[in-house]
Amino acid sequence: MKILVTGGAGFIGSTYVHQVLDQHADDAIVTLDALTYAGNPANLLDLSDHPRHTFVRGDISDASLIDDLVRECDAIVNFAAETHVDRSLLEPEAFLRTNVHGVYVLLDAARRYGRRIVQVSTDEVYGDVPAGIFSTEEDQLAPRSPYAAAKAGGELFCHSFFVSYGVDVVVTRGANTIGPRQYPEKIVPLFVTNALQGLPLPVYGDGLQVRDWLYAGDHAAAIDLVLRHGKPGEAYNIGADNERPNIELVRALLAHLGKPESLITHVPDRPGHDRRYALNWTKIRTELGWEPARTFAQTLNETIDWYMSHPEWWQAIRQPDSEFETYYQRQYAWRLASATDENGAVATK
């Protein structure tokens, strides 16, 4: 099979590309990526001479390019997306362009050429989930951030193309994913790289927001299983049963690094911050036989260890005057100026 992997130079996308090439000797991959801030050529550097891998720089909203690529491939796995909630609050229009219009362009090409497409989505489309409740694939979508709304919009286009045109489309909804090569705007790589530099860890609010933590390699394996065996028109939750409050994650992170908890700095929360996401992933377990291979401790510690052993990767991103630094100052400078420590006292760092 020849697979078009869109967004394949990003975090989960590059994990998927490596995994497929390693595990499926008869498959070839065409990776398409616009190489915006989170698409990193370094994530695929070791594949530059791989005989079954081709890289194309481009945007999923480019209908002519997508037509050419889809015509030559057997299936599409769409990782291409704007993914960060904080950025969606600052610049929501970019999320609409990629996560909705870009998905439409892919679907239209899949319709014309009769290709299967896997749309990689998120548990955030379900919105805030009360304690004791776990979202199933049949639950109503109730997104609460521009990011989640855009992902839900892309999903609805997928459903409409399945119903209206019979497009062979499958959706996955993954839990919070961590692992190697994740852009350091997200909580784990941000906090690991901050801690390694002795910088404060800006925890939103009380830090009691609950997430399920899934390793990128496990997530990629589930997506690949859905590509090969998922039912057309269906959605599949991908969870890990690793529910933890953010503050517990942060303390475990610091303990593994041997860094003091005094680095924890509580900052003003982001608007509309969902308190909990939680997935019921019985469907993919019972129908497709998938389960994650890692515990919470393995998921977190393997992630931390990768950043510790690859300083050149994240230091290249966290340069002074870089895109990342501009974003970091915009997002956190004012929050850190009004921060408190674990006891609620005004922080002095």
Image: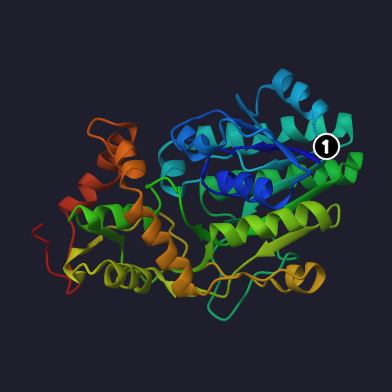
Looking at the image, which residue sits at the far left?
348
Q: Amino acid at mark 1?
A: Asp
Question: Residue at the spot x=18%, y=59% of the render?
Answer: 339
Residue 58 falls in image quadrant = top right
Query: Taking 129 as reference, is 123 above or below it?
Result: above
Residue 170 percent coordinates (x, y): 78, 51
Tally of numbered tags: 1
Q: Tell me the quarter of the image containing the C terminus.
A: bottom left
Colour mapping: rainbow
The residue that mark 1 highlights is 74
Question: Residue at the spot x=40%, y=56% of the render?
Answer: 306
Question: Residue at the spot x=12%, y=69% of the render?
Answer: 345
Residue 44 percent coordinates (x, y): 53, 37
On screen, residue 18 versus residue 263, left or right, reads right
Q: Tell me the quarter of the image containing the N terminus.
A: top right
Looking at the image, which residue sits at the far top?
64
Whether residue 208 is visible: yes
Residue 42 percent coordinates (x, y): 45, 36
Q: Dot 1 lies on which element?
A: loop
Looking at the image, which residue sits at the far bottom?
132
